[in-house]
Image (cartoon, rainbow, N blue to C red):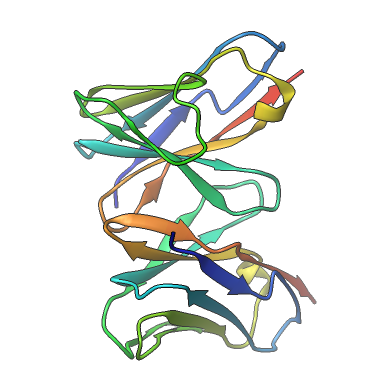
Amino acid sequence: GAVVSQHPSRVICKSGTSVKIECRSLDFQATTMFWYRQFPKKSLMLMATSNEGSKATYEQGVEKDKFLINHASLTLSTLTVTSAHPEDSSFYICSVGWETQYFGPGTRLLVL
Amino acid sequence: GQQVMQIPQYQHVQEGEDFTTYCNSSTTLSNIQWYKQRPGGHPVFLIQLVKSGEVKKQKRLTFQFGEAKKNSSLHITATQTTDVGTYFCAGANDYKLSFGAGTTVTVRA
């Protein structure tokens, strides 16, 4: 399967700041990447589908101005949590693949 | 929209025993996938089932896809401590995955 990395693995930030999370597909050219969010002991919720060279597709209830997604190349997608608040604290995971998904190691965000 | 229900949410198993986790979709699926997430880790793909009534085995794990392609099960025999983690089913339709809530498995030696 595909190898996916994420950076950073953990981040702690102050409320009101913005945080950028990178997702890299190391051995797979991904025209599409997926961003998920997972609360403790909960399932994965798809936030958005990142499309290379075009706008991301957001799931219902996900604020696109809050969670900015950029997919500038076939190997890199970024998720920026803008003006983060404590309720944005979560585990953010990206994945690549069309049918089966290969997940990155995830980024744990804690907003104080 | 599509909903995938998974039970039980928690499964505490004596080492050596068997258990099953079940997955139900509100809509017919093109395929169903199973993932395992170890504590502190990320989901890892286990298997994909595509055909109605399909059964696949991976060592002590047996996966089934229902005839109507709306439900699935994962049966683990002779549970080991390495089986600890959360098992998610994910129903696929239009290339979008909907994850079940997961079954978190703990094992007592």
Q: Position of residue B45 (x, y in %)?
A: 41, 60
| Residue at x 28% of width, y 48% of height | A97
The picture places residue B107, in percent across and down from the top left corner, at 75, 73
The residue depicted at 70 percent of the width and 25 percent of the height is A110
Number of numbered discs overlaid on the protein picture:
0
Please determine whether, in this image, residue B26 is positioned above or below residue A17: below
Is residue A28 toward the left or the right of residue B27 in the image? left
B2 or A21, nearer to the observer: B2
Task: Point out the image quarter for the C terminus of chain A.
Answer: top right
The picture places residue A21, in percent across and down from the top left corner, at 48, 22
In which quadrant of the rendered view does residue B22 lie?
bottom right
Q: Quadrant of residue B68?
A: bottom left
Picture layout, residue B29 above or below residue A75: below
Q: Hey, which quadrant is residue B64 in on the image?
A: bottom left
Near-viewer residue (A43 or B3): B3
As drawn, B22 above or below B102 = below
Pinpoint residue A87: horizontal percent, then vertical percent.
71, 29
Decide which of B49, A67 is in the foreground and name it.
A67
Left or right: B103 with respect to A65? right
Residue occupying image coordinates x 69% and y 69% = B9
Closer to the camera, A11 or B31? B31
Residue located 69% across and 87% down the image = B16
